[in-house]
Image: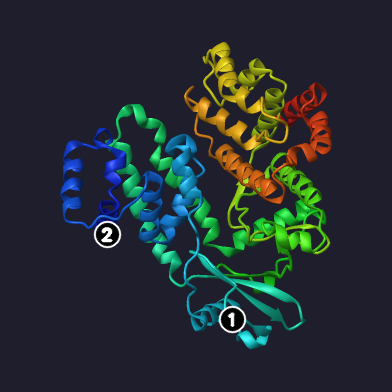
Amino acid sequence: MMDLLRIFRIFCRFRISAYIGAKFLPKTLYFIIKIGELFTPKKQSKNFGEALSSALKEMGPVYIKFGQSLSARPDLIGEEVASYLISLQDQLPPFNASIARVILEQELGKKIDDVFLSFNDEPIAAASVAQVHKAKLKNGADVAVKILRPNIAVEYERDIKLLYFLSNLVAHILPKKYERFKARELVDLFNTSMQIELDLRLEAAAAEEMRGNFNESVYIPEIYWDYTSGRSLVSEWIDGISVYDKKALIKAGLNLDDIAAKLAVMFFNQAFRDGFFHADLHPGNVLITKEGQVALVDFGIMGRLRGKDRFAIAEILYALLQNDYIRVAEIHIEVGYVPEDTNIFLFAQSCRVVCQPIINQSACDISIGKLLEALLEMAVSFNMKPQHQLFLLQKTIIVLEGIGKTLDPDINMWKLAEPWIKKWAGKNISPEAKLLRLIKGFLKKLV
């Protein structure tokens, strides 16, 4: 009850009701909120996105993470609000080094000095769920040590219960025409992703899987499983330059076009070859080694696409770039993104309306992320079923394209990777490839 009252006060302070409006809320609830606002000092905000992101920051770490999760759904909350939520900084003051040492020793079952030659008490990063320290193992290897915040699991259990309560409340009070918000499903998806972040063994497993997918083409840190548990993760330390630090990359004599092409091929491999992609490409998580190799760290937030989705999205993008909007509509119906009785010609025309302005731009300005965003938002109006994995893919592509523009505003990373993408498309979405997949699927059903 106290937590609910605290959230109520925060929402009153930022005048969230002014942005939501009376039409979304029952009259009694709206009246109670307005009374609460009379007795709560106002905090000024420019717009709803700023007010909501500020409120979530004040509510605490779990709500910050939930806001970041919501940012992947611009179709529900609007692009402007999503842009504020995506920029929510997942940074908190570090917790005391003595507490970090106690947690680590509990997880290791040994004294720190029995495992490490050195352990830096000052963390290199402190986020809402965990913080990271640099250390050196007895064998001389430099490692990153990630440690969960004390009591974060208890705090999460408390907050997720409240989020479920609020989602059920929202589902109950929203008018029927806003059913597509599906608040309960949004919390379910958030809960699933947080289970991975709160058990560092699952993050270690994600890193291991991606390391196996890439071998040596992308550098993924080695996991030291002997020292990894639910609350601590020890992995190889990677020296590199943040991909966002253009000046440092140039100073190191690295080729920016080459890096952009490698990033595009890396992500295309992750999403369309493997169906398993890194979905948290912030500045500290994408490094470039002195040899020019792309290195990834922090595998707490990952995206996964089923085979059906991988090939469908690849073929949709291919058809869009060929201006074949009827085929785009057919694929949406074939894979079940929109209902079978959807008017295929109206859907195709609607696709052309939202996508053609993007496709008509010059080659260096075409954004695959914006193209996918426009398509997904339009499909929602045709009763597209919730496709969270596709929105996460779109959000990650937007971030990746932003990295490309940071490296060089005049390059298009997809254009640089075009030879590889064409080769993949010829092998995987050609009529022969699709026929082969159909045959394989049929044979599996017979077994």
- Of 131 and 228, the residue lying toward us: 131
Considering the numbered disc 2 on the image, is that residue within a helix, a strand or a loop?
helix
Residue identifier under label 1: 109
Q: Which of marks 2 and 1 is nearer the N terminus?
A: 2
Inspect the image, locate mark 1, and give the three-letter code of the amino acid beneath it: Gly
Distance of mark 2 from mark 1, alpha carbons? 39 Å
Which residue sits at x=56%, y=78%?
104
Q: Which mark is residue 6?
A: 2
Q: In which quarter of the image is residue 286?
A: bottom right
Query: What residue is drawn where x is 40% and y is 49%?
Result: 50
Q: In this view, does 239 lie to the left or right of 121?
A: right
Quarter of the image with the C terminus in it: top right
Q: Marks 2 and 1: which is nearer the front?
A: 2
User: Of 37 and 238, which appears nearest the observer?
Assistant: 37
Vertical position of residue 25 compared to residue 333: above or below: below
- Number of on-image labels: 2
**In front of the other: 341 or 401:** 401
* Dot 2 amino acid type: Arg
Q: Residue 247 carries which label?
A: none
Query: Residue 443: percent from the left, percent from the top?
Result: 76, 28
The answer to whether residue 189 shows anywhere in this view is: no
Q: Residue at the spot x=59%, y=81% of the render?
A: 109
Position in image of residue 390 (x %, y %): 58, 37
Q: Where is residue 270 in the image (x, y as percent from the top left)?
A: 71, 45
Is residue 286 placed above or below 20 in the rendered structure?
A: below
Res. 120 image quadrant: bottom right
* Rendered-image quadrant of the N terminus: bottom left
Q: In this view, does 272 lie to the left or right of 77?
A: right
> On the picture, is 193 further left or further right than 183?
right
Relative to 348, 215 lies left or right: right
Dot 1 falls on a residue whose secondary structure is: loop
